[in-house]
Image (cartoon, helix red, strand yellow):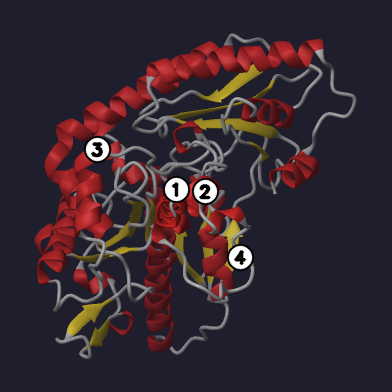
Amino acid sequence: MPLHAKDSVRERLDDEVYASADLAVSMPKYKFPLAEHDPRHAYSVVHDELMLDGNARQNLATFCQTWAEPEVHRLMDECMDKNMVDKDEYPQTAEIEARCVHMLADLWNSPAAANTIGCSTSGSSEAAMLGGMAMKRRWEARRKAAGKPIDRPNLITGPVQICWHKFARYWDIELREIPLEDGRFLMTPAEVIRRCDDNTIGVVPTLGVTFTCQYEPVKAVADALDELQRDSGLDIPMHVDGASGGFLAPFCAPELVWDFRIPRVKSINTSGHKFGMSPLGVGWVIWREVEDLPEELIFWVNYLGGNMRDIALNFSRPGGQVVCQYYNFLRLGKEGYRKIHSACYQTAAFLAERIGKLGPFEILYGGDRHQGIPALCWRIRDGVDPGFTLYDLADRLRSRGWQVPAYSLPANCQGLVIQRILVRHGVSRDLGALLVEDIQRAIDFLAKHPIPAPLGAAEASGFRH
């Protein structure tokens, strides 16, 4: 073969990704590469590693959206270069964000929806912290005006997601998290009032508790705080953590009073990327009225081309998720959101019924749209020893790709282990039926192959990490 022909064959082989010199050796992993690489080769390396991740659609632990319409993917591509904070350069993206704020204020029955204030955030955790900071600043202003100290603020919550623990630690606030009791997994008005005093900056009920997925009684707590104010003069505001429920209750339980219809509710946060069905990376916080956001939490930035208002903790943020949130609002409307979420509730009820019949399980919450989010959770029945723990079951289900978390509840119910399934858009009835079959298959396997030392919380955590 002529020399030039051999060179031509060699070039064609080098063009083949897995026959290339790049992929004939291991790529650098912990030291910065010295040389450049062909984009196809670099892509293949990263793409292949990502195959080892779990299938997001089978992740029934996450509250976050894992399926999106093709139009959402296209909008995300078109908005990849848009910085949400640069409102002078991207004025229409800023206008879209403002429209979403007003739409959410309207959805949550703000008395001043046309004159409300709020913003997008990187997620619901950031939005929750902004609501908490506003409560703290308003409390400090009242205390200073009365000549009282501001060194011992506290915040009252039920069982909360980690973001509220972070908020309390970051801003030196005593978190008065109401401990659970067997049979009571949510805050109650009586437990809230018992913890209120002059240093309480606010009360935070959760519309969709992380652990059991139930709604906390926002209206009942507000009524109790109204009575406390009449009796003692204490005026304690509320912030509702609607990370999940804020995009569910308005569509599927509109008669439930939890939002700005309650005068004591001053702010609400939610996750756009959960049941708002936007891609990962967007949350929202809305204040009841402009006056409810202290002026010192508003910053004005003039070095990006205009004098722009900035509220969020993070500065540069992607604009695509906000644009896709607006797309969903236009695409679905109340009717579309109601249809999609109603289907999720129906699938959750189906799963609760089927899993409840498998034998050793007691359903604690089964996806009632008036009581919580489209989800279910269960425990092993009292007095029943199936020969395995829920950690073992979760471990076994992973062999089929399912992520169905088992975990212990917070204080004072650390001894109670439960398992949970989130039903999001994309978790179909057929997919649910396959899951039930795999749960039964896992139970049968564990019965035939007894585990000498069933997994506990520590072992399960070590396995996961």
Q: Callout 2, which amino acid?
A: Ala
Q: Nearer the viewer, mark 4 or mark 1?
A: 1
Residue placed under numbered mark 4 in the picture = 28
Residue sitting nearer the eye, 22 or 76:
22
Q: Secondary structure at mark 2?
A: helix
- The answer to whether one can see residue 234 in this image is no
**Residue 440 sits in quarter:** top right
Measuring 56% from the left and 72% from the top, which residue is drawn there? 33
Q: Nearer the viewer, mark 2 or mark 4?
A: 2
**Residue 323 sits in quarter:** bottom left
Left or right of 243 in this view: 362: right
Left or right of 313 in this view: 104: left
* Marks 4/3: CA–CA distance: 36 Å
Disc 3 crowd rating (10 Å Cα; few below 14, some 14-19, many 20+) is few
Disc 4 crowd rating (10 Å Cα; few below 14, some 14-19, many 20+) is few
Residue placed under numbered mark 2 in the picture = 19
Disc 1 crowd rating (10 Å Cα; few below 14, some 14-19, many 20+) is few
* Marks 1/2: CA–CA distance: 5 Å
Residue placed under numbered mark 3 in the picture = 69
Q: Nearer the viewer, mark 4 or mark 3?
A: 4
Instruction: Tell me whether the residue at label 1 lies in contact with that at label 3, contact meaning CB atoms closer than 8 angstroms.
Output: no
Residue placed under numbered mark 1 in the picture = 16
Q: Outermost residue, right direction?
A: 452
Rendered image: mark on residue 122: none
Q: Nearer the viewer, mark 1 or mark 3?
A: 1
* Marks 2/4: CA–CA distance: 18 Å
Q: Earlier in the sequence, mark 4 or mark 3?
A: 4
Q: Callout 3, which amino acid?
A: Glu
